[in-house]
Image (cartoon, rainbow, N blue to C red):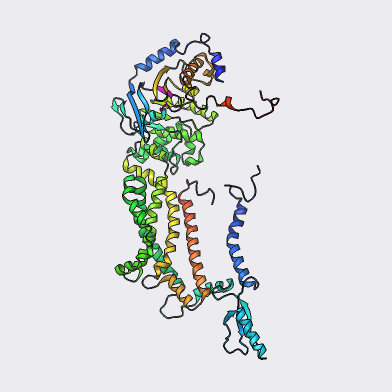
Amino acid sequence: MRDAMNKYVAPGEFPSYLDQSAAVRARFERLKKREVILKVDHLSKVFTTGKGETLALNDISFETHRREFLCVVGPSGCGKSTLVRILAGLEEHTSGEVLLQGKPVTEPGSDRGMVFQGYTLFPWLTVKKNVMFGLEVNGRSKYEAERDALQWLQLIGLEKFADSYPHQLSGGMKQRVAIVRALANQPRILLMDEPFGALDAQTRARMQAHLLEIWRKIDITIVFITHDLDEAIFLADRILVLSAHPGEVQELIEVPVPHPRSAAQFISPEFLATKARLEELIHQGKADDDEDADTYQMVARLTDVTDSVD
Amino acid sequence: MKRKGWFQVLRPLSPRARLAFGTLSFVLPIVIWCIVSYVPAVWHPQMLITDPGSIDYLQVGMRMNKAAFAEAVAEAESEHKDPPKGVSSNPIYLPAPHEVATALYTAFVTPSPTKDSPWLHQSLWHSMQVIFWGFVISSIFGVPLGILCGTYAAFARLNEPFIEFFRYLPAPAFGALAVAILGIYDGPKITIIVIGTFFQQVLIIANTTRKLDGGLVEAALTLGTKKLALLTRVVIPGILPDLYRDQRILLGWAWTYLIVAELIGTTSGITWFITQQARYQHFANVYAAIMMIGFIGLGTDMVLALIGRRLFPWDRTLTKNA
């Protein structure tokens, strides 16, 4: 699959991922003129374990602007989950700074919403009460919270399930509820840690389109962690590519695929060029790093030579 | 692979098979008891004398070993006198099912042999009150402490090492002490049940609390939940179904301490009934009383399970297995 891709996007055949159409360039200019919501400045994280110290994140710096959709990709072990957990305030950083609208982040707060891969809906609350949770703990009256919650559920088309319990919903529905539960607090930024990783391919595609739709309609900045490159290109304005051991910024890619996004763009030249670049960044130096890379060649043939599947 | 039949690993049974096996689990022991009681060839090591014949040391209703009985018969026959007659029977400590069933009924409808002493149902009621108060007092302190230990590591470290030590001290060992402090009536009995339950309760509930999905706490934190609300709005509701299950198990535990507790000070409640009846060798009554405890225990647990299903409609573990 990867070989096939490389063949089709050989240099010269397609525009570089750096080439942007006039519309895309204008859009990025508008984006960068918006205020900076999140500023990560020389952020480092050292884990201290029994065996000693491990540098998980090294000198990470980037900025996101209001209403930007930023995806973070990188090979496994690059610390992308650690990064988003630091942004959420669930984990402490060792040095550097995280500034949300100029204020340093030290602990979790309702100005940053988070969606986890494992849904984490409260199983003892109905769908509606799950959405009301954040509003109520932040001091809103029950009446207001309920009114808001129902509006949010309407936005994602789940108002019929307001009184159902989470276990009665499908995975995709659960994740939609988790997204609006985080959004109901009207955070400045929505952090998403591989939110669609547990969903099947079809549901995942639908959820991606759904998320873009929500993002277009409300004033929200999204930082989205994923290991799925197609997902990153399809969703993101810009993609932050991390390298592993230690996690460092390799490149901040401006995705040249125009908006609004649609599934048809998966085979557009811009899309393929971006994907080729991402593959190059992520898989470089992987040969000596990845234990799984060469194992398939070590498998001996256990069938008759005439009994071939090729 | 075919996945039908009775012996499938981690597979639920069909409703019919469930009912059948559930009934069998009670029927089988009763059947075994019946066979031992009514089929002479199985055990029946003794003879119950129905007619002493010419042997003067025998009386109607006496039981003796078969060998001794055979000797007595041989002795009478050798002297050409009336041989004693009897039917083969089990020892007095194993009454037949119908005898226990009759005892179960008559124990409720006959007044106790001595004046002023309580009827069976009064004894039972007294026992249940002792259990109830013991369990309530233990829970008032044990449940909150357990939750706090499970939630905050500092609490756990401060309490659990000592509790781990204390739970090995057998509750009945405190009997004499409890009597000296609290007198001879219900005070020391309740104390024994509290001591027997409380320390286990704290440790079990602390463990249950620690098993709460940390993701839920993190989700609540990112929604802006602050310290105390985290405990009251996430930890406690999150563990409630498991906490309820723990309490059901612990209530069973409390029952096991009842008999010892009731022997302390003045013997009371169902234990008084059991020891009295055993003294007069009314073993049918003893079995009846023991079974009564079983019925009450199982009955309360089934009612509590039913209530639990109503209280926690979101709880998935209740419908799994069991």
**What residue is drawn where x is 64% and y is 70%?**
B42
Which quadrant of the view contains residue B265? bottom left
From this view, report whether residue B63 is shown above or below residue A242.
below
Is residue B8 one of those drawn in magenta?
Answer: no
Name the foreground residue: A98 vs A286: A286
Is residue A76 one of those drawn in magenta?
Answer: yes
Q: Residue furthest right?
A: A306
Give coordinates of residue A40: x percent, y percent. 33, 24
Say if residue A113 shows up in the picture. yes
Give coordinates of residue B233: x percent, y percent. 37, 44
User: Is A41 placed left or right of B274 in the picture?
Assistant: left
**What residue is drawn where x is 37% and y is 73%?**
B266
Q: Quadrant of the N terminus of chain A?
A: top right
Q: Residue furthest top?
A: A12
Name the foreground residue: B124 vs B160: B160
Give coordinates of residue B148: x percent, y percent. 34, 48
Q: Quadrant of the C terminus of chain A?
A: top right
The number of callouts visible is 0
**Magenta span of residues:** A62-79
Say if residue A144 shows up in the picture. no
Give coordinates of residue B83: x percent, y percent. 65, 87
**What residue is drawn where x is 60% and y is 56%?**
B19
Name the foreground residue: B241 vs B44: B44
Which quadrant of the view contains residue B170? bottom left
**What residue is drawn where x is 64% and y is 88%?**
B76
User: Is B26 placed left or right of A289 in the picture?
Assistant: right
User: Is A110 placed left or right of B287 in the picture?
Assistant: left
